[in-house]
Image (tube, helix red, strand yellow):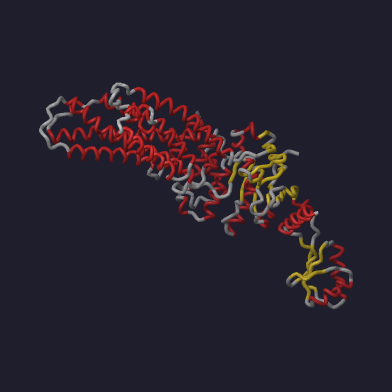
Amino acid sequence: MDFVIETDKLTGGYGVLLVLREVSLRMPRGSIFGLLGPNGAGKTTLIRMILGLLRPVSGEIRLFGESLDGALPGILGRVGSLIEQPSLYDHLTGAENLEIVRTLRGLKQADIDRAVKLLDIGKYVQRRVKEYSRGMRQRVGVAAAILGNPELLLLDEPMNGLDADGLVGFRAMLQTLNREYGVSILISSHQFQEVDRIATHIGIMSSAGDLLFQGKREELSTLVPQELVIRVDRQVDALKILAGGSFAAEIREDQLVIRGATTEMARTVNQLLVANGVGVHHLAIELTTLEALFVKVTNTKKAWDTQ
Amino acid sequence: MRIAMALVRAEAIKLRRTSIPTMAVIAAILASVTELVNLLDSGGGPPDLRPPAVIWQNLLQGHWALWLVFFVPMLIALEAASLANLEHSGNQWKQLFTCPLPRWTIYATKMLFCGALVSAGFVVSALGFIVDGLIFSGLHGLHLASAIPWFAIAALTGKAALACWLPVVIQSWLSARFSGFGIPIGIAFAALLFGFMMIGERLNAIVSWYPWMLPFGTQGRANHPDNTVLPVVFGCVGGIVAGIFACRDLARRRDQG
């Protein structure tokens, strides 16, 4: 497989504080890779190392198959990035900020025009950055990151500060970049729902700074059984009936949940409840949320650690 | 060459709507106005019958001493700190370092811009000196306009500006290393005070090697009035050597996060 980012046993941090521990990441070309983890897991540190902003204590980084050590700084021309808060000059306009990046990266004016259009920032790009809201800053920061159509885009918490409309547009923009322009995108985030909507691949980091899982989104789903969610008119009676039928259901808010759902089970459960006079309003197999998967993976790791 | 042009252009954009370029002009004008007030204050005696060239030489020494001893070291410190703080303020360094550019070029550009702005201050200061001299001449009927020492002014301006490179590099280094104005300006002020005290203590040799006094040294020391080349050489060569070390040190520090 062709990887845009490969790290081998990457270890490092700040001074004596080790933040990353033997992280071996493989990010396939053309993927949208969601890097998840709690605050302090080392997501930003990993991105800083990939960009050559921080030297690892040990391990190796390869970008596009080339060792980072020998390829800097030229290889950064193929990488766009947004790390933490957008780095913008407040006294300049958004357009002037983009012009600085364009100049330093040796790009064309058309690259700015394209980014402005994609991010839909034309309305305020001529205003000074100090007048921007957080969301506006974020958009201009992303526009700077995508200037010149980089092959790889590294975005650290890019959805911070975006409102609901902004999030929808942002997701669409990332998908356009990925599908139409072939840009591989790594997004670090703690907003699982947002990442879940666009990521093709997932990486999960623990608070100890190691990579617990990496792979396709579907692979992650297989780690946790799916759930059968049922809403009925007589919850307590339904629970007893299901227990009698050897279905271990649990009450979660206003619904009953049975883990390890299959289509066959859904049919049987429905028949059982209806036959016993329980009104079934809703019955569905729900895909496990990424958040639940994250909890599952991190808990599994904790269990391993305590053994 | 493309990288150099790109860095210069980017730096020029960053200076838009900032007071950084005007600071150099204002400092030079302030020095000229101060010197003019000084001249007018001391002009109440008998008419000066010396030849115009001698009067100009006298004026030049007075004006240049004020500009070089007091104004230039603080102007260098302010310009260097302001240029560096453009990047410190929003942690722009990280954005710059993700561009496909050698890191040392980013620091070297800062130093070059600081040097260029201080040099611009020198040009304004030279013009201010001429204006001062002509006003002084007009008020005292000295007819100095026909004897403006263009070459002496240009030579002194050029030499002093070249001697500035070492303090420019040192202040740029400090300013890139430490965020904010406190440390770089504090060090410049302490260095200026120390240099001034040393001159007061008649340790005039200090102006040949003490970085913050090098521009003043181009005027000629009291005990070696002709040796004005040494501060220029020391300022230029020292500036280049210190610049190499500074760029290496700063790039290495950023590597460590």
**In the foreground, A214 or B247:** B247
Determine the residue located farthest toward the top in the rendered image: B226
**Left or right: A17 with respect to B41?**
right
User: Is residue B154 at least partly visible in the picture?
Assistant: no
Number of labels in the image equals 0
Quadrant position of residue A144: top right
In the rendered view of the protein, which quadrant contains the C terminus of chain B? top right
Q: Percent x, y for residue A71?
A: 63, 32
User: Is residue A82 at least partly visible in the picture?
Assistant: yes
* Above or below, A277 relative to B167: below
**Left or right: B9 with respect to A177?**
left
**In the foreground, A85 or B181:** B181
Q: Percent x, y for residue B102?
A: 55, 33
Q: Percent x, y for residue B85?
A: 45, 44
* Above or below, A189 relative to A148: below
Q: Percent x, y for residue B233?
A: 39, 23
Quadrant position of residue B132: top left
Determine the residue located farthest toward the front in the rendered image: B201
Give the residue drawn at x 31%, y 35%: B69
